[in-house]
Protein backbone atom coordinates (compact mmCIF):
# COMPACT_ATOMS: atom_id res chain seq x y z
CA UNK A 1 0.00 0.00 0.00
CA UNK A 2 1.03 3.63 -0.39
CA UNK A 3 1.79 5.59 2.75
CA UNK A 4 3.70 8.64 3.90
CA UNK A 5 6.63 8.10 6.27
CA UNK A 6 8.66 10.61 8.29
CA UNK A 7 12.05 9.81 6.76
CA UNK A 8 14.06 12.39 8.68
CA UNK A 9 12.34 14.95 10.91
CA UNK A 10 13.07 18.52 9.92
CA UNK A 11 11.51 21.69 8.51
CA UNK A 12 8.56 20.75 6.33
CA UNK A 13 9.90 23.04 3.61
CA UNK A 14 12.73 20.48 3.20
CA UNK A 15 10.29 17.60 2.63
CA UNK A 16 10.93 15.37 5.69
CA UNK A 17 8.23 12.90 4.52
CA UNK A 18 8.52 10.29 1.78
CA UNK A 19 5.63 8.67 -0.13
CA UNK A 20 6.58 4.99 0.07
CA UNK A 21 5.31 1.44 -0.29
CA UNK A 22 4.53 -0.26 3.02
CA UNK A 23 3.13 -3.74 3.62
CA UNK A 24 -0.62 -3.92 4.10
CA UNK A 25 -0.94 -4.08 7.92
CA UNK A 26 -2.38 -7.17 9.56
CA UNK A 27 -4.75 -6.50 12.47
CA UNK A 28 -3.56 -8.07 15.70
CA UNK A 29 -5.78 -9.55 18.36
CA UNK A 30 -8.36 -6.94 19.36
CA UNK A 31 -7.62 -4.71 16.35
CA UNK A 32 -9.44 -3.57 13.23
CA UNK A 33 -7.97 -3.08 9.77
CA UNK A 34 -9.40 0.15 8.37
CA UNK A 35 -9.49 1.27 4.75
CA UNK A 36 -8.83 5.01 5.04
CA UNK A 37 -11.34 7.27 3.32
CA UNK A 38 -10.14 10.60 4.70
CA UNK A 39 -7.63 11.85 7.25
CA UNK A 40 -7.48 15.32 8.75
CA UNK A 41 -4.20 17.23 8.84
CA UNK A 42 -3.38 18.23 12.41
CA UNK A 43 -0.70 20.56 13.74
CA UNK A 44 0.58 17.64 15.80
CA UNK A 45 1.43 15.91 12.50
CA UNK A 46 3.54 18.96 11.70
CA UNK A 47 5.29 18.78 15.09
CA UNK A 48 6.09 15.09 14.52
CA UNK A 49 7.32 15.73 10.97
CA UNK A 50 9.52 18.66 11.98
CA UNK A 51 10.96 17.02 15.10
CA UNK A 52 9.32 19.30 17.66
CA UNK A 53 8.16 16.05 19.29
CA UNK A 54 10.71 13.27 19.87
CA UNK A 55 10.75 10.30 17.52
CA UNK A 56 8.75 7.41 18.99
CA UNK A 57 8.74 5.20 15.88
CA UNK A 58 11.29 5.72 13.09
CA UNK A 59 9.62 6.13 9.70
CA UNK A 60 6.18 6.53 11.26
CA UNK A 61 3.16 7.31 9.11
CA UNK A 62 1.44 10.41 10.60
CA UNK A 63 -2.29 11.04 10.81
CA UNK A 64 -4.81 10.59 13.61
CA UNK A 65 -8.07 12.10 12.33
CA UNK A 66 -9.06 9.06 10.31
CA UNK A 67 -12.45 8.17 8.86
CA UNK A 68 -12.53 4.73 7.29
CA UNK A 69 -14.29 1.44 6.80
CA UNK A 70 -13.52 -1.81 8.63
CA UNK A 71 -12.20 -4.37 6.13
CA UNK A 72 -10.79 -7.01 8.50
CA UNK A 73 -10.80 -7.90 12.18
CA UNK A 74 -8.25 -9.52 14.45
CA UNK A 75 -9.26 -12.08 17.04
CA UNK A 76 -11.44 -11.24 20.04
CA UNK A 77 -13.10 -8.22 18.42
CA UNK A 78 -16.71 -7.43 19.27
CA UNK A 79 -18.92 -4.46 18.52
CA UNK A 80 -17.69 -3.87 14.97
CA UNK A 81 -18.48 -5.67 11.73
CA UNK A 82 -16.88 -5.65 8.29
CA UNK A 83 -18.17 -2.58 6.44
CA UNK A 84 -18.72 -0.46 9.56
CA UNK A 85 -17.62 3.15 9.37
CA UNK A 86 -15.20 4.08 12.16
CA UNK A 87 -13.05 6.92 13.37
CA UNK A 88 -9.43 6.54 14.46
CA UNK A 89 -8.27 9.26 16.84
CA UNK A 90 -5.05 10.35 18.57
CA UNK A 91 -5.34 8.19 21.71
CA UNK A 92 -4.55 4.65 20.54
CA UNK A 93 -4.02 2.57 23.67
CA UNK A 94 -3.69 2.83 27.46
CA UNK A 95 -2.79 0.23 30.07
CA UNK A 96 -6.22 0.29 31.76
CA UNK A 97 -4.75 -0.65 35.13
CA UNK A 98 -2.66 2.27 36.41
CA UNK A 99 -3.97 4.74 38.98
CA UNK A 100 -4.78 7.29 36.25
CA UNK A 101 -6.76 4.84 34.12
CA UNK A 102 -8.64 3.51 37.11
CA UNK A 103 -9.73 6.97 38.21
CA UNK A 104 -10.94 7.93 34.72
CA UNK A 105 -7.89 9.95 33.68
CA UNK A 106 -6.59 7.61 31.00
CA UNK A 107 -5.19 10.61 29.10
CA UNK A 108 -2.48 10.72 31.79
CA UNK A 109 -1.57 7.02 31.53
CA UNK A 110 2.26 6.70 31.50
CA UNK A 111 1.97 3.76 29.08
CA UNK A 112 -0.37 5.55 26.64
CA UNK A 113 0.25 5.20 22.90
CA UNK A 114 -0.77 7.51 20.08
CA UNK A 115 -1.85 7.08 16.48
CA UNK A 116 0.64 8.52 14.00
CA UNK A 117 3.38 8.74 16.65
CA UNK A 118 3.72 5.32 18.32
CA UNK A 119 1.95 3.45 15.51
CA UNK A 120 1.34 4.16 11.84
CA UNK A 121 -1.60 6.45 11.23
CA UNK A 122 -3.88 7.66 8.48
CA UNK A 123 -1.59 9.28 5.89
CA UNK A 124 -1.95 5.94 4.12
CA UNK A 125 -4.40 3.73 2.30
CA UNK A 126 -4.94 1.52 5.36
CA UNK A 127 -4.31 1.65 9.07
CA UNK A 128 -5.10 -0.41 12.17
CA UNK A 129 -6.74 0.56 15.44
CA UNK A 130 -7.53 -1.29 18.67
CA UNK A 131 -11.28 -1.87 18.54
CA UNK A 132 -11.68 -0.52 22.08
CA UNK A 133 -10.32 2.85 20.90
CA UNK A 134 -12.25 3.11 17.62
CA UNK A 135 -15.22 5.49 17.40
CA UNK A 136 -18.43 4.40 15.62
CA UNK A 137 -19.39 7.03 13.06
CA UNK A 138 -22.65 7.80 11.23
CA UNK A 139 -22.98 6.88 7.56
CA UNK A 140 -24.95 10.00 6.63
CA UNK A 141 -22.20 12.60 7.20
CA UNK A 142 -19.45 13.14 4.64
CA UNK A 143 -16.07 11.70 5.68
CA UNK A 144 -14.31 15.00 4.91
CA UNK A 145 -16.59 16.82 7.36
CA UNK A 146 -16.12 14.15 10.02
CA UNK A 147 -12.33 13.79 9.93
CA UNK A 148 -11.31 16.99 11.78
CA UNK A 149 -13.75 16.22 14.58
CA UNK A 150 -11.61 13.25 15.63
CA UNK A 151 -8.75 15.30 17.05
CA UNK A 152 -9.26 19.01 16.44
CA UNK A 153 -12.80 18.70 17.72
CA UNK A 154 -12.11 16.35 20.61
CA UNK A 155 -9.05 18.24 21.86
CA UNK A 156 -10.90 21.53 21.53
CA UNK A 157 -13.71 20.07 23.61
CA UNK A 158 -11.33 18.96 26.35
CA UNK A 159 -9.64 22.37 26.27
CA UNK A 160 -13.06 23.99 26.67
CA UNK A 161 -13.82 21.79 29.66
CA UNK A 162 -10.43 22.58 31.21
CA UNK A 163 -11.11 26.29 30.72
CA UNK A 164 -14.10 26.02 33.11
CA UNK A 165 -16.26 28.44 31.12
CA UNK A 166 -19.30 29.44 33.21
CA UNK A 167 -22.77 29.33 31.63
CA UNK A 168 -23.17 32.31 29.31
CA UNK A 169 -19.53 33.23 29.90
CA UNK A 170 -17.03 35.23 27.86
CA UNK A 171 -14.50 33.03 26.07
CA UNK A 172 -11.32 34.12 24.32
CA UNK A 173 -9.73 31.90 21.66
CA UNK A 174 -6.10 32.60 20.77
CA UNK A 175 -5.42 31.13 17.36
CA UNK A 176 -8.25 30.06 15.09
CA UNK A 177 -7.30 26.97 13.14
CA UNK A 178 -8.87 23.53 12.90
CA UNK A 179 -9.46 23.00 16.61
CA UNK A 180 -10.48 26.52 17.58
CA UNK A 181 -13.12 26.94 14.89
CA UNK A 182 -14.85 23.76 16.07
CA UNK A 183 -14.56 24.72 19.73
CA UNK A 184 -16.07 28.12 18.93
CA UNK A 185 -19.14 26.55 17.33
CA UNK A 186 -19.80 24.39 20.37
CA UNK A 187 -19.26 27.26 22.83
CA UNK A 188 -21.59 29.51 20.84
CA UNK A 189 -24.24 26.78 20.70
CA UNK A 190 -24.03 26.53 24.48
CA UNK A 191 -24.62 30.26 24.94
CA UNK A 192 -21.12 31.70 25.30
CA UNK A 193 -19.85 35.02 23.97
CA UNK A 194 -16.72 34.26 21.92
CA UNK A 195 -13.85 36.63 21.15
CA UNK A 196 -11.19 35.45 18.69
CA UNK A 197 -7.59 36.68 18.61
CA UNK A 198 -5.50 35.48 15.69
CA UNK A 199 -2.93 36.81 13.23
CA UNK A 200 -4.72 35.51 10.10
CA UNK A 201 -7.24 37.86 8.43
CA UNK A 202 -9.04 34.94 6.74
CA UNK A 203 -9.42 33.21 10.10
CA UNK A 204 -10.81 36.42 11.61
CA UNK A 205 -13.39 36.59 8.83
CA UNK A 206 -14.36 32.96 9.42
CA UNK A 207 -14.72 33.62 13.15
CA UNK A 208 -17.17 36.44 12.53
CA UNK A 209 -19.10 34.34 10.01
CA UNK A 210 -19.48 31.61 12.65
CA UNK A 211 -20.87 34.08 15.17
CA UNK A 212 -17.92 35.39 17.20
CA UNK A 213 -18.62 38.72 18.91
CA UNK A 214 -15.21 40.06 17.86
CA UNK A 215 -12.10 39.01 15.95
CA UNK A 216 -8.84 40.86 16.49
CA UNK A 217 -5.10 40.38 16.07
CA UNK A 218 -3.33 37.77 18.17
CA UNK A 219 -1.53 40.37 20.31
CA UNK A 220 -4.55 42.67 20.69
CA UNK A 221 -6.68 42.92 23.82
CA UNK A 222 -10.24 41.58 23.65
CA UNK A 223 -13.02 44.17 23.96
CA UNK A 224 -14.04 42.97 27.42
CA UNK A 225 -12.55 40.89 30.26
CA UNK A 226 -12.71 37.13 29.70
CA UNK A 227 -14.08 34.48 32.03
CA UNK A 228 -12.05 31.81 30.23
CA UNK A 229 -9.51 31.60 27.44
CA UNK A 230 -7.94 28.84 25.38
CA UNK A 231 -4.54 29.13 23.72
CA UNK A 232 -4.54 27.09 20.52
CA UNK A 233 -1.60 28.83 18.85
CA UNK A 234 1.73 27.18 19.88
CA UNK A 235 3.16 30.57 20.83
CA UNK A 236 4.40 30.95 24.39
CA UNK A 237 4.57 34.76 24.08
CA UNK A 238 0.77 34.81 24.13
CA UNK A 239 0.46 33.21 27.58
CA UNK A 240 0.98 36.39 29.63
CA UNK A 241 -1.25 38.39 27.27
CA UNK A 242 -4.07 35.88 27.62
CA UNK A 243 -3.69 35.83 31.41
CA UNK A 244 -3.90 39.62 31.53
CA UNK A 245 -7.10 39.48 29.46
CA UNK A 246 -8.82 37.30 32.06
CA UNK A 247 -11.26 38.69 34.57
CA UNK A 248 -10.80 37.84 38.25
CA UNK A 249 -10.99 34.09 38.80
CA UNK A 250 -10.56 33.39 35.09
CA UNK A 251 -8.94 30.28 33.63
CA UNK A 252 -6.54 29.92 30.69
CA UNK A 253 -6.10 26.46 29.20
CA UNK A 254 -3.28 25.68 26.79
CA UNK A 255 -4.50 23.21 24.19
CA UNK A 256 -1.39 22.28 22.21
CA UNK A 257 1.01 19.37 22.66
CA UNK A 258 3.91 21.73 21.89
CA UNK A 259 4.44 25.35 22.93
CA UNK A 260 7.36 27.69 22.34
CA UNK A 261 9.04 29.04 25.46
CA UNK A 262 6.89 31.18 27.72
CA UNK A 263 8.34 34.50 28.95
CA UNK A 264 8.54 35.12 32.70
CA UNK A 265 5.15 35.74 34.29
CA UNK A 266 4.57 38.78 36.49
CA UNK A 267 2.58 37.55 39.47
CA UNK A 268 0.58 40.71 40.18
CA UNK A 269 -0.24 41.41 36.52
CA UNK A 270 -0.91 37.90 35.24
CA UNK A 271 -1.77 35.50 38.06
CA UNK A 272 -3.15 37.46 40.99
CA UNK A 273 -6.90 37.51 41.74
CA UNK A 274 -7.00 33.69 41.58
CA UNK A 275 -6.44 33.37 37.87
CA UNK A 276 -5.47 29.86 36.75
CA UNK A 277 -3.19 28.49 34.04
CA UNK A 278 -3.95 24.89 32.98
CA UNK A 279 -2.49 22.53 30.43
CA UNK A 280 -4.40 20.05 28.29
CA UNK A 281 -3.00 16.56 27.79
CA UNK A 282 -4.54 14.41 25.07
CA UNK A 283 -8.10 13.24 25.79
CA UNK A 284 -10.04 10.33 27.15
CA UNK A 285 -12.29 8.11 25.07
CA UNK A 286 -15.24 9.55 26.96
CA UNK A 287 -14.20 13.04 25.83
CA UNK A 288 -14.42 11.76 22.27
CA UNK A 289 -17.83 10.14 22.74
CA UNK A 290 -19.25 13.22 24.46
CA UNK A 291 -17.93 15.61 21.82
CA UNK A 292 -19.20 13.54 18.89
CA UNK A 293 -22.67 13.44 20.50
CA UNK A 294 -22.64 17.20 21.08
CA UNK A 295 -21.30 17.92 17.60
CA UNK A 296 -24.16 15.93 16.08
CA UNK A 297 -26.73 17.64 18.31
CA UNK A 298 -25.53 21.18 17.59
CA UNK A 299 -24.51 20.70 13.96
CA UNK A 300 -20.81 21.43 14.52
CA UNK A 301 -19.08 21.26 11.14
CA UNK A 302 -15.53 21.82 10.03
CA UNK A 303 -14.59 24.30 7.35
CA UNK A 304 -12.42 22.05 5.19
CA UNK A 305 -9.86 22.22 2.40
CA UNK A 306 -9.33 18.95 0.53
CA UNK A 307 -6.00 17.56 -0.67
CA UNK A 308 -5.42 14.18 -2.35
CA UNK A 309 -3.38 11.75 -0.26
CA UNK A 310 -0.35 12.23 -2.53
CA UNK A 311 -0.22 15.93 -1.52
CA UNK A 312 0.08 15.41 2.24
CA UNK A 313 3.42 17.17 2.47
CA UNK A 314 2.02 20.13 0.54
CA UNK A 315 -0.91 20.28 3.00
CA UNK A 316 1.51 20.39 5.94
CA UNK A 317 3.44 23.25 4.33
CA UNK A 318 0.19 25.15 3.81
CA UNK A 319 -0.80 24.51 7.43
CA UNK A 320 2.51 25.87 8.70
CA UNK A 321 2.25 28.96 6.48
CA UNK A 322 -1.37 29.61 7.48
CA UNK A 323 -2.58 29.43 3.88
CA UNK A 324 -6.08 28.21 4.77
CA UNK A 325 -8.71 28.75 7.42
CA UNK A 326 -10.45 25.83 9.12
CA UNK A 327 -8.88 22.41 8.55
CA UNK A 328 -7.14 20.49 5.77
CA UNK A 329 -8.26 16.95 4.97
CA UNK A 330 -6.48 14.31 2.91
CA UNK A 331 -8.73 12.15 0.73
CA UNK A 332 -7.57 8.67 -0.22
CA UNK A 333 -8.24 8.64 -3.95
CA UNK A 334 -6.08 5.57 -4.66
CA UNK A 335 -7.63 2.22 -5.68
CA UNK A 336 -8.01 -0.39 -2.92
CA UNK A 337 -5.24 -2.91 -2.37
CA UNK A 338 -6.33 -6.50 -3.05
Image: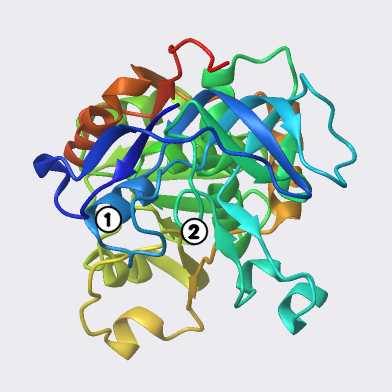
Tell which residue pokes out farthest to the left in this image: 14
Look at the image and tell me in which quarter the C terminus lies.
top right
Q: Is tag 2's residue or tag 1's residue first in the polypeptide sequence? A: 2
- Packing grade of label 2 (10 A; few <14, some 14-19, many >=20) is some
Q: Is residue 183 toward the left or the right of residue 95 in the image?
A: left
Q: Is residue 273 visible?
A: yes
**Residue in the picture at 42% in, 25% down:** 329
* Count of numbered tags: 2
Residue underneath mark 1: 221
Check the image and report above or below for 225 versus 41: below
In the drawing, does residue 201 fall left or right of residue 239? Answer: left
Pinpoint residue 200: horizontal percent, then vertical percent: 21, 36
What secondary structure is found at the residue carrying circle 2?
Answer: loop
Identify the residue at horizontal 28%, vertical 72% (top origin): 240
Using the image, determine if residue 60 lies above or below residue 128: below
Q: Position of residue 264 (x, y in %)?
A: 22, 85
Residue hosting label 2: 118
In the image, residue 214 sits, relative to residue 331, either above or below, namely below
- Report, in whole angstroms, how far the alpha carbon at label 2 lies from the one at label 1: 39 Å
What quarter of the picture does the N terminus occupy? Answer: top left
Expressed as whole percent of the image width and height from the top left, the position of residue 143 reads 58, 19
Q: At 37% across and 22% down in the image, what residue appears?
A: 309
Question: At x 19% / y 36%, what residue is drawn?
Answer: 317
Q: Residue furthest bottom?
A: 267
Front residue (pair 152, 136): 136
Asked if marks 2 and 1 touch (Cβ < 8 Å), the reply is no
Frontmost of labels 2 and 1 is 2
Q: Is residue 211 visible?
A: no
Can you say whether 246 is above or below 60 in the image? below
Amino acid sequence: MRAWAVAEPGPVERNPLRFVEKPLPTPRRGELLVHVLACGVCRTDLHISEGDLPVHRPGVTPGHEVVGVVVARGGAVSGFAIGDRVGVAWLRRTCGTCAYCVRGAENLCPASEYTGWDADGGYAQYTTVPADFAHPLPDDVDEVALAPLLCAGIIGYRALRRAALPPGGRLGLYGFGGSAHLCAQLALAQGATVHVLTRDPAARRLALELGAASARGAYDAPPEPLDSAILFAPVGDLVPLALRALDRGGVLSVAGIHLSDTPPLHYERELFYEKELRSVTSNTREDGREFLRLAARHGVRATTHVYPLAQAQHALRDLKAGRFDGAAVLVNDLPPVH
